[in-house]
Image (cartoon, grey):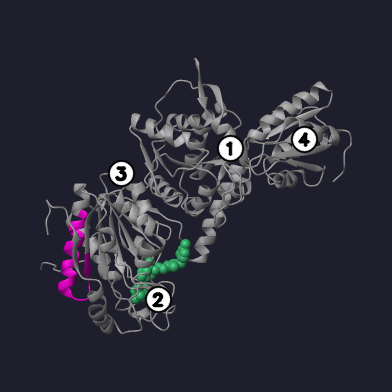
Amino acid sequence: MKKVFTRPESLKDIPFHYCPGCTHGIVHRLVAEVIDEMDMYERALGVAPVGCSVFIYNYMDFDMYQAAHGRAPAVATGIKRVLPDRLVFTYQGDGDAAAIGTGELVHAAARGEKITVIFINNAVYAMTGGQMAPTTLLGQKTTTTPAGRDAGINGMPVKVCEMLAPLDGSAYLARVSVHNPKNIVAAKKAIRKAFDIQMRGDGFTLVEVLSSCPTNWGLSPLEALKWLEQNMIPYYPLGEYKTPAEVGK
Amino acid sequence: MAKVLMKGNEAIGEGAVRAGCRYFFGYPITPQSELPHYLAKRMPEVGGLYLQSESETAAANMVFGAAGAGARVMTSSSGPGISLMQEGISYIAGAELPCVIVNMIRGGPGLGNIAPAQSDYFQAVKGGGHGDYRVICLAPASVQEIIDLMQDAFDLADKYRNPVMLLADGVLGQMMEPVELGEEKFVQPPEKPWAATGRKKGGPKRLINSLYIVPEECEQHNLKLAKKYAVISREEQRWEEYHLDDARLVIVAFGTSARVCKAVVDRARDEGMAVGLLRPITVWPYPTGVIKRIREKVDRFLVVEMNMGQMIEDVRLAVEGARPVHFYGRAGGMMPVARDIFNEVKKLYNGGAEQ
Ligand SMILES: Cc1ncc(C[n+]2csc(CCOP(=O)(O)OP(=O)(O)O)c2C)c(N)n1
Ligand code: SF4
Ligand SMILES: [Mg+2]
């Protein structure tokens, strides 16, 4: 009998530590599947962030790095400049990439660094207990915005794809979601496209993944996916924000 | 071989290239600018990379990535930039990555100024970043020594999988001296099977990491590091002795201040005083052994620094109270003047104030 559902070779056969309903695991799987399909296991190098997904370095079966909070794009720059024919990606949360690591992210994009950032937007600092992230929505309650995010105090949420799009060094920017199977398929396509464009040498690539954190949102796994769809997607529209002309949509 | 005239900052660059370093990441700051200028031209000639980062924070983390990928890599800065690198240096030490970091120390604290100083001694040898780690610190005192120590710096970094810091100041960086470069030879950096360059199917997985979430495992990691540091402390102490044999008063000074003190020793000898100089070349590991060996034979020590008294703590630790340890320092980018040090020596030599 032909197996139709197997674990990707690039994903180690150990259980995830993520909470039930957390979408980090789905995104890990998509990254691993794409690396398998591209036959890049031996040439893939990933950089783990500081955040709930720090242990991605255990889940990915190939060689990995663990970076300081927010510094993954700088670490990836060092790796890629030494090993230009490798597939180098970072996996970062919104606090990691869009707050403490904004400088490293923006300048990796500005330099057209041939890396891919898998950017997990879950609208909170999940690992440290659900504090406000730069991506926390207006009115969204977190442990540090108990009355809801107030634009007068905290400003407006950061839209990372839109922020990076004007930089000439960015080659591919897409926002996807993993709240249902249809979107998961689209997310995987975007990751594949980003990796392909990286390997073509076109420049900086980033896939922003709207992701759920039922634990810190205080919702059940199912409610969390619904909340994502109803609240995050209107503010963070899905789609490709940048793609090389020759590659097309 | 003919000697060539070189500035200290350029010598760091040429020394690095000759030691097989092919990657430099850094952010502009005075007084080390001639070094990036030199490498921006020199690196492409040897197929290497000079990359200007957006900050010193980023530079240190680019070094982390390049070192993890197996490269001989360096960065360079001065006080304020080195402060920003401390996060990266701690991670580099934790992940046991080899690299070379240059600190052309300037006056501080804060923005201070761009004049030569030795006020980052504590930061360099006592930690600087968070966690229980050590950085091998080399303190050259001439342009020739810079060239020679750059090769050693990269070799020590690879041998111990540890960051190495070169401590100098604007005087050494700007100073022009004739140097013997020697034959340019091809340097094959050692094999680094631990480097994460892409996992062969069926081969071992490589992980460049400083996270040990289980305290028992983190303690084991710290014990392993401590063992390595103990070996370095035992094996790698380096110093220069100048008229130590019969010295009654021993000046202890490193780098630029040691150069000034050499002239002081000469003058004191001319006037019949048995004064010597101990110049630490490694400030971590500190050359404690030689101080322990000579401390009973001398009357007193005088530590001379371009700060308000930092290395003196290491001298006192080695002297263990056996003899008085005095201090003379200039700070904020001011240089100690030979005449003033000499007057201090004279006063102390003739039984000056006990401490
Ligand atoms: C320099 C530094 N500051 C703060 C922290 C604490 N910290 C750990 S994870 C984290 C937030 C991570 O949030 P995010 O990047 O959104 O990832 P998530 O957990 O949501 O996936 C913080 C602030 C740290 N490890 N290092
Ligand atoms: S806290 Fe949130 S992001 Fe972290 S594992 Fe749990 S659900 Fe996922
Ligand atoms: Mg987050």
In the rendered view, tell whether residue A44 sits above or below residue B157: below
Please rate how many residues cluster around mark 4, counting C-alpha atoms within 10 Å: few if below 14, some from 14 to 19, many from 20: some
Which residue is disc 4 drawn over? B294
Mark 1 — on which chain does it sit?
B
In this view, the residue in front, B334 or B164, is B334
Quarter of image, res A69 = bottom left
Quarter that holds the C terminus of chain A: bottom left
Residue corresponding to mark 3: A83
Work out whether disc 1 and disc 3 sit on a shared chain: no
CB under 8 Å between callouts 1 and 4? no
Label 2, label 4: how many angstroms apart (C-alpha)? Answer: 68 Å
**Pick the front one: A109 or B126:** A109
Coordinates of residue B92 in the picture (x, y in percent): 47, 50
Q: Give the residues in magenta.
A: A175-195
**Above-or-below relation of B144 to B28:** above
The residue depicted at 55 percent of the width and 57 percent of the height is: B130
Q: Secondary structure at mark 1?
A: strand
Instruction: Single out the mark in the foreground, 2 or 3.
Output: 2
Q: Is residue B262 left or right of residue B213?
A: right
Q: Secondary structure at mark 2?
A: helix
Q: Residue B239 in the image: x percent, y percent?
A: 65, 33
**Residue under circle 2?**
A152
Dot 4: element: helix
Chain hosting mark 2? A
Comes first in the chain, label 1 or label 4: 1
Residue lying at 54% horizontally and 61% vertically, measured from the top left: B219
Dot in front, 1 or 4: 1
In the figure, is residue A27 to the left or right of B149?
left
> Pointer 1: residues within 10 angstroms few (<14), some, or many (20+)?
many
Q: Identify which amino acid the numbered label 3 is placed on.
A: Leu
Chain-order first, disc 2 or disc 3: 3
**A6 relative to A82, above or below:** below
